[in-house]
C-alpha cells in the first residue's frame, strides 16, 4: 500500500485492517512481480531462494529495479553498493555492564557468519570489506545493559561488521547508538542462544546528510527470545533490514520499529521473519510519522511460515501517520504460509492522516489543535518507544521526537 | 450568574445520501446550578446537540445560536469553548494510544487554567478525585481510554469533569452501560462537581434510571430533532411509566421506545 500525503480523503489512520489468512494458502499464485498493492500476491518464498553470498563479486551491479532496491534512492546509496569501502574498525565508546564484553575479532573467526549471509550487494560489499568484527558477548542471567556509541564515522564510505552473541540462559540488552556523519554499509549478526533473552535496540540519529544501509541477521535458539527495536530519526537515507531465522522450537521474536521522517528524508526497513521450527512466535510492529515535502518511508514485512513451523503464531503490523502534504509511506506486508497447522497469523497495515476523533477529544478538553496534534503523534510513536524497556533511553528518545515536532512548524 | 442558551438551533450532517437535517429548531436555557435532563428515543438528535455545543466539525449549524453569557459559542474553536467553561462527557470516549492519563489530565488542566497547576496540590487533587470515583491509582499510568471498560471510560469522563471544573457540562448518556454500583459512583461524582462549583448540567439520557441519583430541575423530551415536551421532574416519572410511545409514529419499533 502506498499512501501519499496529497491524498484528499482522510484515511482511517489508526484502525487499519486485520485479516487472518487461511492456512495452507500459497500466495505464489498471480504475478511474479513484486507489487505494492498486492497483499498475498507476492511470492515471499523467493526470499528463501534469494541469492546469497559473502562475496560482493558474486552480485550483479544494482540497477535499482530489484525487489530489494526498488524503493531506495539509488543515486544516493551508490557508493555503498558499488564503491570501495574502508573496512577499518570504527571507533566506538561503550558503557560497562556486568555480563557483557566487547572486543574486536579477526574476520576469520568462526563466530562470524553464524547468523547471516548477504542477500544484496551493499551487504555483501560490507562483508567483503571489513577488517575486523566487533564481538559483543552476553553471559549470565543478569548481564545488564550496554550502550555502544558510534559518532565519529565521517563522510567517507565505510564498512562494519558486528556480532552479538547471547549465551545460553543469558539475559541482557545491547543498545547500538548511531549519530554524526556517515556513509556506512554494515552487517549485524545476532545469535540468541537457547533459553536466552536478548534485547537489541538500534537508534539512528545520524546527521541530516548521512547514508546508512544495514542488515541485521538474527538466529534464535531453542526457547530463545529476541526483542529487536529499531528507532530511525536522523539521516538522509537510512535503511535497516532486520531478518530473523526462528530455527529452533519455541523461538520468540518481537520486532519493533519507530521512525520519523522529515522533509527529504528516506527511512526504510525491510523486515523478514522466517518461521522454520515448531511453536515459534513472532510479533512485528512498526510505526512511522512523516512530515515535510519528500519525506519518504518504506516498510516491507515478509513473514514466511515454513512446513517445519507447526503451531506457529505470528502477527505483523505497520502504521503510518502522514502529518503534511508531500509525504509518502510505502507499506508492504507479505505473508506466506506453507503449513496448515498454525496457531495464528495476521497482519495490519494502515497509513493516513490524523484521527479527527482523537483531536476532537483532546480539543474538547481545552487543548489547542497544535498541542493536540503533538500529543497524538508523540503518543503514536510512544507505543513503540515504550517497548524498549530502558527508561532513560525512552525518555531521551521521547524528547528527540518532541523536538522534531516542535522544530517544524508544519504540525 | 452564567447562562448557556440554545436558540432555534438547526443542525445537519453530510451523509453518503446527502445532507441530513437532524436538529430542527431547538431552544434551551440552562442557568448555572440547574440540572436539565434531555430525554428521548435513539436517533432523536441528543448526541448531535451535545456535539454541536462542543463544536465537533462533523455537525453543520444551518441556523440558530448557542450563547454562553451572551457570547457566540459557535464562533469559537473546540478548545476555546472548553476554555470558556463548557465540558462534554462523551457517550463514546476516544482512545488515545501512547498518551498517559496523568499527562493528559495535566495538559488539559494547564490549557483550561492558562497556567500549570501547582504540582503538589494537583497530584493530591487527582488522587483524591480518583479515589472518590473508586478508580485504581494505576489508571494514571494507562493510556487515555485504551483498554478501559465501558464503566471505566465513564468514570474517567467524570474525573475530568471534577478536575477541570467547567461552568456547564453536557453529559451524553453517561449512564449507559453502567451497572447500579457504577451508576451511583458516577452520579455522586456529578453531584459533587455541582456542589463544589455550581455547575449547570445538560444531562442526556435515554432512561430515567440516572434521574433517581441526579435530580433534574427540568425535563425536556427530544423527538425527531425538536423538544416535543417540557416539564419538571414529574415528566420523567411519566416517561418511566409510559415510555416514548405517545411521541412516536405508530410504526416505530417498540424496543426503541423502551424506557426504564
Ligand atoms: N455523523 C453522522 N452521519 C450520519 N448520520 C448521523 C451522524 N450523526 C448522527 N446521525 C444521524 O442523526 C440522527 C440523530 O443521531 P444522534 O444525535 O446520535 O441521536 P441520539 O443521540 O439521540 O441517539 C440519527 O438518525 C443518526 O443516524
Ligand atoms: Mg446519542
Image (spheres, rainbow, N blue to C red):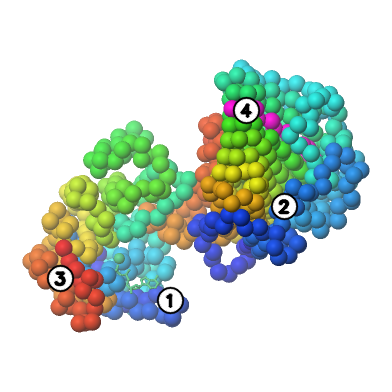
Residue drawn 71% across the image and 65% down it: A30
Residue depth check, mark 4 versus mark 1: number of the one nearer the observer: 4
- Secondary structure of the residue carrying numbered label 4: loop
Residue drawn 88% across the image and 39% down it: A55
Q: In the rendering, at what x and y percent does residue A316 appear? A: 58, 49
Q: Name the disc covering residue B243, or none.
A: 3
Residue at which label 4 appears: A194
Q: Chain of mark 4?
A: A
Quadrant field for ligand 2? bottom left
Residue at which label 1 appears: B15
Indicate left or right for A383 with A228 as reference.
left
Label 2, label 1: how far apart the Cα atoms are: 45 Å
The quadrant of the rendering that contains the N terminus of chain A is bottom right
Residue depth check, mark 2 versus mark 1: number of the one nearer the observer: 2
Q: Are marks 2 and 3 on the same chain?
A: no
- Secondary structure of the residue carrying numbered label 2: helix
Amino acid at each position: 500500500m502506498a499512501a501519499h500525503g496529497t491524498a484528499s480523503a482522510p484515511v482511517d489512520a489508526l484502525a487499519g485492517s486485520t485479516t487472518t489468512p487461511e492456512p495452507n494458502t500459497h500466495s505464489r499464485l498471480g504475478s511474479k512481480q513484486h507489487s505494492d498493492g498486492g497483499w498475498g500476491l507476492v511470492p515471499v518464498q523467493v526470499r528463501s531462494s534469494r541469492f546469497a553470498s559473502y562475496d560482493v563479486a558474486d552480485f550483479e551491479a544494482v540497477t535499482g529495479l530489484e525487489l530489494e532496491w526498488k524503493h531506495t534512492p539509488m543515486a544516493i546509496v551508490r557508493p555503498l553498493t558499488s564503491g570501495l569501502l574502508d573496512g577499518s574498525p570504527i571507533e566506538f565508546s561503550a558503557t560497562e555492564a556486568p555480563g557483557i564484553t566487547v572486543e574486536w575479532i579477526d574476520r576469520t573467526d568462526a563466530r562470524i557468519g553464524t547468523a547471516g549471509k548477504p542477500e544484496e550487494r551493499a551487504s555483501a560489499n560490507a562483508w567483503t570489506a571489513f577488517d575486523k568484527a566487533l564481538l559483543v558477548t552476553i553471559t549470565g542471567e543478569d548481564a545488564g545493559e550496554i550502550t555502544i556509541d558510534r559518532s565519529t564515522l565521517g563522510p567517507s564510505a565505510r564498512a562494519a561488521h558486528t556480532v552479538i552473541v547471547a549465551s545460553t540462559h543469558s539475559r541482557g540488552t545491547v543498545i547500538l547508538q548511531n549519530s554524526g556523519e556517515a556513509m556506512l554499509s554494515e552487517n549485524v549478526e545476532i545469535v540468541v542462544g537457547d533459553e536466552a533473552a536478548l534485547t537489541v535496540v538500534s537508534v539512528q540519529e545520524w546527521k541530516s546528510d548521512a547514508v546508512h544501509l544495514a542488515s541485521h541477521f538474527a538466529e534464535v535458539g531453542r526457547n530463545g527470545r529476541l526483542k529487536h527495536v529499531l528507532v530511525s530519526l536522523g539521516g538522509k537515507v537510512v535503511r535497516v533490514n532486520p531478518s530473523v531465522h526462528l530455527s529452533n522450537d519455541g523461538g520468540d521474536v518481537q520486532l519493533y520499529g519507530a521512525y520519523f521522517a522529515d522533509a527529504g528524508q528516506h527511512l526504510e526497513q525491510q523486515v523478514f521473519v522466517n518461521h522454520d521450527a515448531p511453536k515459534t512466535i513472532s510479533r512485528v510492529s512498526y510505526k512511522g510519522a512523516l512530515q515535510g515535502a519528500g519525506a519518504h518511508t518504506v516498510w516491507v514485512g515478509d513473514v514466511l511460515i515454513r512446513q517445519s513451523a507447526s503451531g506457529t503464531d505470528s502477527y505483523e503490523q505497520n502504521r503510518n501517520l502522514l502529518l503534511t502534504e508531500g509525504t509518502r509511506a510505502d507499506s508492504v506486508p507479505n505473508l506466506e504460509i506453507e503449513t496448515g497447522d498454525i496457531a495464528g497469523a495476521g497482519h495490519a497495515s494502515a497509513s493516513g492522516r490524523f484521527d479527527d476523533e482523537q483531536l476532537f477529544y483532546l480539543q474538547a478538553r481545552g487543548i489547542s489543535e497544535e498541542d493536540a496534534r503533538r500529543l497524538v503523534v508523540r503518543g503514536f510513536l510512544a507505543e513503540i518507544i515504550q517497548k524498549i524497556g530502558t527508561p532513560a533511553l525512552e525518555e531521551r528518545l521521547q524528547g528527540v521526537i518532541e523536538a522534531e515536532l516542535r522544530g517544524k512548524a508544519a504540525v | 450568574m452564567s447562562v448557556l442558551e440554545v436558540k432555534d438551533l438547526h443542525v445537519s450532517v453530510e451523509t453518503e445520501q446527502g445532507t441530513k437535517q437532524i436538529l430542527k429548531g431547538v431552544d434551551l436555557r440552562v442557568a448555572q446550578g440547574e440540572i436539565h435532563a434531555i430525554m428521548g428515543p435513539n436517533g432523536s438528535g441528543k448526541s448531535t446537540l451535545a456535539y454541536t455545543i462542543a463544536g465537533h466539525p462533523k455537525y453543520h449549524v444551518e441556523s440558530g445560536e448557542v450563547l454562553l453569557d451572551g457570547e457566540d459559542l459557535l464562533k469559537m474553536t473546540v478548545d476555546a469553548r472548553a476554555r470558556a467553561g463548557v465540558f462534554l462527557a462523551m457517550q463514546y470516549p476516544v482512545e488515545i494510544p501512547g498518551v498517559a492519563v496523568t499527562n493528559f489530565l495535566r495538559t488539559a488542566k494547564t490549557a483550561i487554567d492558562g497556567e500549570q497547576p501547582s504540582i503538589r496540590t494537583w497530584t493530591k487533587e487527582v488522587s483524591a478525585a480518583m479515589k472518590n470515583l473508586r478508580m485504581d491509582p494505576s489508571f494514571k499510568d494507562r493510556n487515555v481510554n485504551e483498554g478501559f471498560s465501558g464503566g471505566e471510560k465513564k468514570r474517567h469522563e467524570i474525573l475530568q469533569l471534577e478536575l477541570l471544573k467547567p461552568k456547564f457540562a453536557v453529559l451524553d448518556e453517561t449512564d449507559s452501560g453502567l451497572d447500579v454500583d457504577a451508576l451511583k459512583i458516577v452520579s455522586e461524582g456529578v453531584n459533587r462537581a455541582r456542589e463544589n462549583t455550581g455547575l449547570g448540567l445538560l444531562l442526556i439520557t435515554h432512561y430515567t434510571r440516572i434521574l433517581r441519583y441526579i435530580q433534574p430541575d427540568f425535563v425536556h423530551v427530544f423527538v425527531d430533532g425538536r423538544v416535543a415536551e417540557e416539564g419538571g421532574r414529574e415528566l420523567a416519572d411519566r416517561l418511566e411509566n409510559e415510555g416514548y410511545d405517545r411521541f412516536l409514529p405508530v410504526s416505530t419499533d417498540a424496543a426503541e421506545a423502551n424506557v426504564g
